[in-house]
C-alpha cells in the first residue's frame, strides 16, 4: 500500500506503484448483469455457445465492465489521510489491450503519476494497469484522475 498523511503528500510518492494482492474473477453472471444494465447484449458477451466458435474461444467481458471495476480493483492500494471528500474526476486516456474472457482473473497495479494542487485540494492522476492472470498483455491501461478535498 502507498500511504500519505495528506493529499499534498501525493506529490512525494509520484512514480510509486502498488499491485493488489488478490485476484478478481470475471464470471459469466457478472458479464450478463453488465449486459442487462447497459443494454449491450452482443453475442460475444452473452452467448457462450456462439462465442466458443468466435475469435476468443469464449465470451468476453465488455471493456467498459473491466474499466468500471477499477475502483474495486484499486480499493485500499493508496491511502490518503486528511481528506474530507474524494471524487472521481475522470479519465485522461484508456486503452483496451486484450479481452477478458469469462472465468478469467484480473488484478490492478496503480502508479501515482501526478499530484497537482487545485483550489479544491489536490488533483492526482494514477496510471492503472489491469492484468489478466497468466496473460502476456494487460486487459487495459487507464489514466484515472481523482480529486482529493482536504478535511
Image (spheres, rainbow, N blue to C red):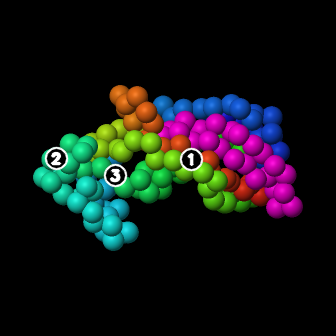
The residue segment tinted magenta is: 108-130
Nearest the eye: 125 or 33: 125
Looking at the image, tell me whether mark 1 or mark 3 is earlier in sequence order.
3
The Cα atoms of the two marked residues, 1 and 2, are separated by 29 Å
The Cα atoms of the two marked residues, 3 and 2, are separated by 14 Å
Report which residue position mark 3 lands on. 61
- Left/right placement of residue 77 relative to residue 107 reads right
User: Label 2's element?
Assistant: helix
Q: Main secondary structure of the magenta part?
A: strand
Give the label on residue 142, or none: 1
Report which residue position mark 2 lands on. 52
Question: Few, some or many C-alpha atoms within 10 Å of disc 1 (few <14, some 14-19, many ≥20)?
Answer: many
Task: Work out whether 54 lies above or below 16.
Answer: below
User: Label 1's element?
Assistant: strand
Task: Work out whether 149 lies above or below 25.
Answer: below
Quarter of the N terminus within the rendering: top right
* Residues tagged 1 and 2 counted as in contact (Cβ below 8 A): no
Does residue 150 appear in the picture of this structure?
Answer: no
Amino acid at each position: 500500500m502507498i500511504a500519505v498523511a495528506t493529499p499534498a503528500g501525493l506529490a512525494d510518492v509520484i512514480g510509486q506503484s502498488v499491485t493488489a494482492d488478490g485476484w478478481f474473477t470475471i464470471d459469466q453472471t457478472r458479464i450478463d448483469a453488465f449486459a442487462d444494465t447497459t443494454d449491450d447484449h452482443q453475442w460475444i458477451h452473452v452467448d457462450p455457445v456462439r462465442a466458443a466458435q468466435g475469435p476468443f474461444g469464449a465470451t468476453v467481458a465488455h471493456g467498459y465492465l473491466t474499466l468500471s471495476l477499477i475502483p474495486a480493483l484499486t480499493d485500499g492500494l493508496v491511502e490518503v489521510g486528511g481528506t474530507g471528500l474524494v471524487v472521481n474526476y475522470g479519465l485522461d486516456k484508456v486503452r483496451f489491450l486484450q479481452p477478458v474472457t469469462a472465468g478469467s482473473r484480473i488484478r490492478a497495479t496503480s502508479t501515482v503519476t501526478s499530484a497537482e494542487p487545485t483550489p479544491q485540494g489536490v488533483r492526482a492522476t494514477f496510471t492503472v494497469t489491469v492484468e489478466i492472470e497468466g496473460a502476456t498483455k494487460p486487459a487495459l491501461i487507464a489514466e484515472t484522475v481523482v480529486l482529493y478535498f482536504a478535511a
